[in-house]
Image (spheres, rainbow, N blue to C red):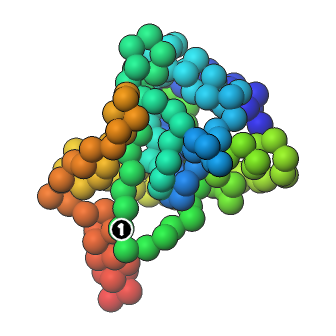
Amino acid sequence: DPDALKSLLHREGRRICGIVVQPVLGSGALPLSDALLAVLESASQAGVPVQMLVRGICALRPGVPGLSETIEVRSVLGRFLEHSRVFWFENGGSPSTWIGSADLMHRNLDRRVEVLVRLPGSGLVTEVGELLDLAFDPQTSAWELSSDGRWFQCRGARHLHEVLIQRQRSRRS
């Protein structure tokens, strides 16, 4: 619901992260709803930094002066096709994190019933926050979307998927 997202965005002061690792913000056959585009652009115009991690095509143009200059869009591609959807709201220092199955495509916002669930407990929220920080770290290899709609590669020394695989291995041992 764009209205619910809008109210969460309006209370933000530092950042919102939307993690969606599949085509989510699309153009052509994968359009982002006009209402949601307007909400994200309005948040940017109010000075809210918006960070988005997307898998594929993105209809939003980040970094356009006066329109979306506080929006950053990155894509971290790796060996696996993840389907995670995480919405992080800084919430004035008391982070709120939501997970769900729906991405932000028009059909999911307007023609389906989709559910987001708030993560319970500060431990899980902290862990997700650390993953988001890692994904947006300049040392993490990623693609970044420019204001003209072109993607450019940022060759960081760290590969997110390798770090995640190594963390999982260390948990098992």
Q: Is residue 135 positioned above or below 46 on the image?
A: below
Is 168 left, or right, of 85 in this rendering? left
* Screen quadrant of the C terminus: bottom left
| Residue at position x 58%, y 17% in the image | 42
Say which element carries label 1: loop
| Residue at position x 27%, y 44% in the image | 152
Residue 74 position, x and y percent, is 38, 45
Is 110 left, or right, of 106 in this rendering? right
Residue 82 position, x and y percent, is 51, 67
Is 37 left, or right, of 156 in this rendering? right
Q: Is residue 57 visible?
A: yes
Q: Nearer the viewer, residue 100 or 21?
A: 21
How many neighbours does mark 1 have within 10 angstroms: few (below 14), some (14-19), or many (20 or more)? few
User: Which residue is label 1 attached to?
Assistant: 78
Q: Nearer the viewer, residue 111 or 119?
A: 111
Q: Is residue 130 visible?
A: no
Residue 75 position, x and y percent, is 39, 51
Which of the 4 image quadrants contains residue 2? top right
Residue 110 position, x and y percent, is 81, 41
Q: Is residue 128 positioned above or below 12 on the image?
A: below
Q: Nearer the viewer, residue 152 or 10?
A: 152
Q: Is residue 71 positioned above or below 173 on the image?
A: above
Q: Give the residue furthest to the front.
A: 28
Q: Amino acid at mark 1?
A: Gly
Which of the 4 image quadrants contains residue 49? top left
Is 116 left, or right, of 66 in this rendering? right
* Screen quadrant of the N terminus: top right
Q: Nearer the viewer, residue 157 or 117?
A: 157
| Residue at position x 54%, y 37% in the image | 59
| Residue at position x 46%, y 41% in the image | 52
